[in-house]
Amino acid sequence: MVATGEPRIAARFAALKAEKRAGLITFVTAGDPNPETSLAVLKALPGAGADIIELGMPFTDPMADGPAIQRANLRALKAGATVKKTLAMVKAFRSGDHNTPIVLMGYYNPVHSYGVPAFLKDAKAAGVDGLIVVDLPPEEDAELGAPARAAGLSFIRLATPTTDDKRLPKVLANTSGFLYYVSIAGITGAAAPEISTVAAALTRIRKKTSLPVAVGFGIRTAAQAEAIAGIADAAVVGSALVDCIGEGQAKKPAEVVASVTALMRELAAGVRKARK
């Protein structure tokens, strides 16, 4: 259970620390491949091992994402996905799950079009815990980061292999919830991370922050998830799940859920092998 007054993200990482293990953060795109299936998958993720859920806000030009997530965005948009419907999906999820943190991930354009004050108010009311907006650098913090934190939402930033010691303090300055470390240079799902390189980067980052550090991009198998869980506070898996959903888009919701949860259980088992 979430402690009274304690944000869900902080509570979840505290619980993971108590369990002496890393977390599994899963990414799916809201509305992919259709609203009914997407909500069914979302509701099934915690029971299959997801500790935190990143929910993608569909957008026409997801420039940091690889082909798998690009296709998911297009499927969702074709099925009628919008920001308003994404928030409604979170609200529907919250009716049965009050503890699993949900982080909306995406790009600034849909948020700007919705209107920042209205978006933050509606996101908070729906049960969103944090935001990752990949195309807003720290220099643009006044656009969304500062207002989000003032509204009680974590604003989670990304660090990459090119984030050097000069840039890192600026990235960390107003980051909250956790730091997302992008394990490879490039787009999502492009390649597998090199564990020794990631470990060295995390050692450097942890000298500058006490925030939990989650590692994503390129994690597709239980073995990869286990390796990352051994060095990070959480492993993030997205493209593998999105591909699984895409492969079953013509199937009934229950069949897609069965495929996704089977993969999730494999990934979760890998993460849980890496005891701290």
Image: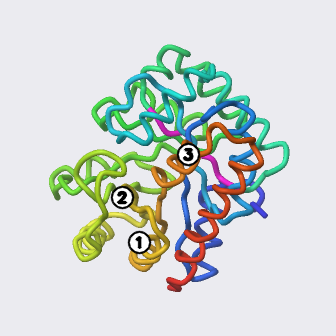
Residue 37 falls left or right of residue 145: right
Furthest residue to the front? Answer: 250
Q: Three-letter amino acid code at disc 2?
A: Gly
Using the numbered discs, state the Cα–Cα distance from disc 3 to disc 2 in whole angstroms: 19 Å
Q: Position of residue 264 (x, y in %)?
A: 61, 63
What secondary structure predominates along the stretch shown in magenta? strand
Residue range (magenta) = 100-106
Q: Nearer the viewer, mark 1 or mark 3?
A: 3
The disc placed on residue 54 is none
Q: Amino acid at mark 1?
A: Gln
Q: What residue is pinned by disc 3?
A: 247
Mark 2 vs 1: CB contact within 8 A: yes
> In terms of image quadrants, where is residue 92?
top right
Residue at mark 1: 224
Q: Earlier in the sequence, mark 3 or mark 2?
A: 2
| Residue at 50%, 14% in the rendered image | 113
